[in-house]
Amino acid sequence: MKIAVLTSRYPYPLEKGDKLRIFNHIRILSEKHEVILISIAENEDYKMHLDKLGEYVSAQHVFVLSKVERALSLSKTAVTKGSFRSAYFYSNRIKRKISKVLTEINPDHIHCHLIRMANYLDQRGTRTSLDYMDCFSAEANKRMGNATGLRAYFFRKEYRRTLHDEAQAFKAFDQHFIISDQDRKLLNVENPAQVKILPNGIDLDFFKLNTSRSPKFDIGFMGNLGYYSNLEAVKFLKQNLIPHVAGLKMLIAGARPPKWVLHLGKQHHIEVVPWLEDIREAYWNIKVFVAPLFKGVGMQNKILEAMACGIPVVTTDQVNNAIGAINNKEILIANTGEEFKNAIHQLLEDKDLYTLITQNASSFVQSNFSWEKQTQVLLQYIDSTNP
């Protein structure tokens, strides 16, 4: 089959969760089908990575969305119902180009990644699928609840507009996918049961146990520090753990850290690393991974990566709901500052428990979270539509 994949970001390099997800979907789909990439980019940097995607796709159609076009699209939200998130990635010019490409290549199937690409699709007669990935309306709702003043007003509008986007997208596509059952339950669609669960995976050849590691840090947190939920996790660490674990060394690693996060690195027992070429070096350099993520949506790949590397993870019920690990066997659950402190000390002081969690966590991820296994849901659906 000939499959056209539409993405709102060029899916490389893999520094964002949405890029990681669609890159691996493309990689696996390409093993059985011809994949054609149709993507938006914010600048010409994507050209440095054409060869990487070229390993898996037969053609690439990439359109750079200018800042002027973004501003114009955002200004039109004054008279439209769509979300600012979708408007940020939209251009009438690019829509015309995408429509022309789709007409020329005449794909058997069109797969859109994220609801912000739904506005680009008006083809009829071709089977279509949409990957919501996360429930973005739930994220907007969370941010609305944590904001005040004008920010609260903005997120209230974005929440309502994203609910509208989700409902409209459900009507427009033949099949829908989302990352977890808890995200599916939050979707604003007519029949959530029709949305298939498509969990994330990880590269199990890349993320694995390192028996020769000698960790420098007792605890650590890794994640893109330009994302709201990850910054909230660091704030939790700052308020609930850092003042109480002065004897422990901590590593915070991730791209785009704001100044207040970098400032934490001035404390002698904390190191902040803005960028690592190989994120495994961060995992292998800590004894315990702490992830105080609350009210989150989606599936946290950093949790799976740490577990695959054999790093015991302490995280919340909310995070583990999407993963399904067993508490005190494959993961440790904590939902308050006190519970996080107790779990950390328990792991660091009980060698038998530490070894048990290390081995079980790695085995759990190895058995359940390969990209090849997780992507079968998408692959089976597309195969079933083979004309």
Image (cartoon, rainbow, N blue to C red):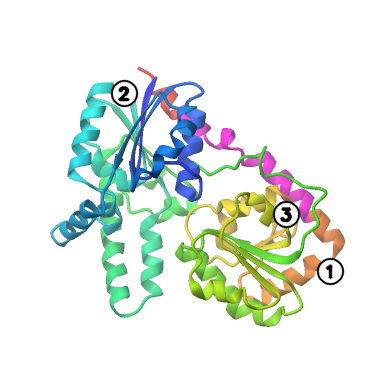
Q: Are marks 1 and 3 in contact (CB under 8 Å)?
A: no
Say which label, 1 or 3, has the lower sequence index.
3
Residue that lies at the very extreme toward the top in this rendered image: 387
Query: Could you tell me what secondary structure mostly forms the magenta stretch?
Result: helix
- The magenta region covers 357-380
Q: Which residue is mark 3?
A: 284
In what element is the residue under mark 1? helix
- Mark 2–mark 1 distance (CA, rounded to whole Å): 58 Å
- Mark 1–mark 3 distance (CA, rounded to whole Å): 19 Å
Q: Nearer the viewer, residue 80 or 295?
A: 80
> Label 3 neighbourhood size at 10 Å, few (<14), some (14-19), many (20+)?
many
> Label 1 neighbourhood size at 10 Å, few (<14), some (14-19), many (20+)?
few
- Mark 3–mark 2 distance (CA, rounded to whole Å): 44 Å
Indicate the position of residue 304 as horizontal and vertical percent values. 62, 50
Q: Which residue is mark 1?
A: 349
The residue under the point 78% across, 49% down is 359
Say which label, 3 or 2, has the lower sequence index.
2
Q: Which dot, 3 or 2, sits closer to the camera?
A: 3
Numbered mark located on residue 107 in the image: 2
The residue under the point 26% across, 57% down is 83
Image: 44 above or below 263: above
Magenta stretch containing residue 347, yes or no? no
The answer to whether residue 215 shows anywhere in this view is yes
Name the kind of residue labelled 2 in the image.
Pro
Numbered mark located on residue 274 in the image: none
343 vs 105, left or right, is right
Indicate the position of residue 110 as horizontal and vertical percent values. 33, 30
The residue under the point 18% across, 41% down is 93
In what element is the residue under mark 3? helix
